[in-house]
Amino acid sequence: MEAVIHKPVANPLRMFFTSRTWRRLARRKSALFGLVVVLLVITVAILAPVLAPYDPAAQSWTAVRQPPSAQYWLGTDEAGRDILSRIIYGARASLMAGVISVGIAMAIGVPLGLAAGFVGGLLDGFISRFTDAMLACPFLILAIAFAAFLGPSLTNAMLAIGITAMPLFVRLTRGQVLSIKAEDYIEAARAVGNPQWRIAIRHILPNVLPQLMVQATLTIASAIIAEASMSFLGLGQQPPAPSWGSMLNSAQRFLSNAPWMALWPGMAIFFTVLSFNLLGDGLRDALDPRSK
Amino acid sequence: MTTLLARRLLQLLPTLFLLSLIIFSLQHLLPGDPALVLAGENPDPETIARIRAAYHLDQPIFVQYLFWIQGVLTGDLGESLRHNQPVLDLILQKLPVTFQLAVMGILIALILGIAGGLISAVKRDTAADYATNVVSLAGISIPNFWFGIMLILFFSVHLGWLPASGYVSPFNNWRMNLATTIMPAFVLGTGVAGVIMRHTRSAMLQALESDYVRTARAKGLSERTVILKHAMRNALTPIITLGALEFGALLSGAVLTEQIFTIPGFGKLIVDSVFNRDYAVVQGVVLFTAVFYIALNLLADIGYILVNPRLRS
């Protein structure tokens, strides 16, 4: 009996990595492209010290604003720093911001959503209204406000983005919990005397995880843009540490005589965000039972 | 309808209360003594005392909140330390500029989004459909500040057609106004166009597979009439609601766009205030935007009820 009841619990997590899900994902060329680029960016970020041809912070006053050449593949910036090396190291800031801020959002949002959906009543009412209140503030404006009060730094930007993205996970988790709660296997788990916390954590949460993974992938894309936006405004990564957003900030002053300074960091943000979006869309389709 | 509206308004009260708590709490995130931080660099004791009194910082926190919310409810959002002006006046001064950008942006978004979504749905699984999908996803993924920089590079630096920055009021010179706002409005509109395109496509696909469209085709109506008069009319209802909601999101986008094009609007106000440590303005802008967004949400709900006879009854 116990094994039968637990069967649907183990499935969703496994389903995420089962051959059928991967087959469906692999059939979507755009999702595969997204996955390959995401893996490439992760590899570049990890191997930055090996891959970067120069020290990203090393200034060279004899090589100021050099156009792309055999020596400097993507050119140099206003302090003679190699743009390629800064883009390679900038991938670390962007990925870290994306993953850590989404981690913060999930760490707070998922338990709140689980509690709201599972317990219901007054607690649900309070958490839902709190979520509505946070969602009423436009994402970037609220993140900027948090960062303004916390002070400009990459850590505070990640914290601000994480707190701002948190309501998305509360709402998603709550909605999923409400629908899963009505399933027969949850009723069965309750009938055999499982305590409430066990039903919530062992039986409901694993079934919400696939949807959370999709949302996390898409939110990483938004978080990367938000971090780049905040660094562009001077509220994220502080100079001379490299970040794609802050590179665009300094590039703005040299548009007419060094356009390459603006081109490459923007392309890096665009392709990374596009890839996370493609991967997120692909995962959603692959996990949708209605899709072939 | 009145009961529904009253219930909807009642539901908003706790949300507004919690929103006020969140925004009020922001100033308590400041490290150390808020009066010292708010007073800026090298403050004299008089300024610190004035700030402490103005924000009631010597009172318990819930008393501070009561004073603050009382001010908010009477239209007093505090005073800008930088401009020595009430925050609400500052916001209302800057709002028309951002409002113009947002209106132009949403028009561009609706035109591009609906046209793209329509083509994509009607030409399903063709090259046009794939191309539209790529364009819509690119619109969502492109960082609008970079897109703005690229437009400046091409249209201002390379071609010299449009001014790279600045703003001219339409009452002074409408041609120059259009020249200074068209690029930022386009940047704002493209991100939202991607979202609208996706929703239009899926709503149109659903409408095209419905029974009333099949009946319209069976009656022998031309494909053009079936698409434009029968399917599109029904598919567009939720899109218009979405447009109203995205209008609020455009205010968020304006923060970066106004910074790039040096447009003295609402978005530039919040960024300048952050760097001037003018925290009352930051709080005021967040509160104003959130309340504006909630009001838009409510209007969108009412609009949806009005155009949907099933909900009206």
Image (cartoon, rainbow, N blue to C red):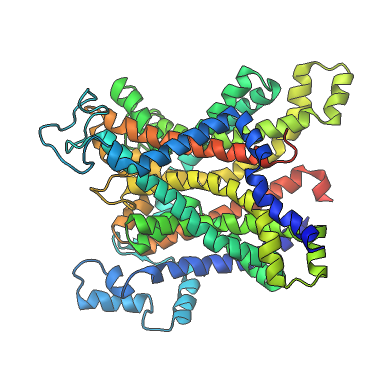
Residue A269 in the image, given as x and y percentages of width and height: 40, 37
Name the residue: 18% across, 28% down. A66
Q: How many marks?
A: 0
Return the residue nearer the eye: A130 or A279: A279
Position of B65 compared to B222: left or right?
left
Residue B304 as seen in the image, left or right of residue A75: right
Identify which residue, B217 or B285, lies in the foreground: B217
Coordinates of residue B175 in the picture (x, y in percent): 39, 28
Q: Position of residue B41 (x, y in %)?
A: 21, 66
Q: Nearer the viewer, residue A160 or B102?
A: A160
Residue found at the far left of this picture: A62
Residue drawn 49% across and 52% down?
Answer: A139
Does the image show residue B291? Answer: no
Looking at the rendering, which quadrant does residue A145 occupy?
bottom left
**As drawn, is B56 to the left or to the right of A32?**
left
In the figure, B40 relative to A60: above or below?
Answer: below
The quadrant the N terminus of chain B occupies is: bottom right
* Residue drawn at point x = 56 percent, y = 53 percent: B293
Residue at left 26%, top 27%? A73
Q: In this orientation, which residue lies closer to the viewer: A174 or B42? A: A174
In this rendering, the answer to whether B151 lies above or below A159 is: above
Res B179 quadrant in image = top left
Question: Is there any visible trace of residue B247 in the rendered image?
Answer: yes
The spot of residue B72 in percent (x, y) is 48, 68
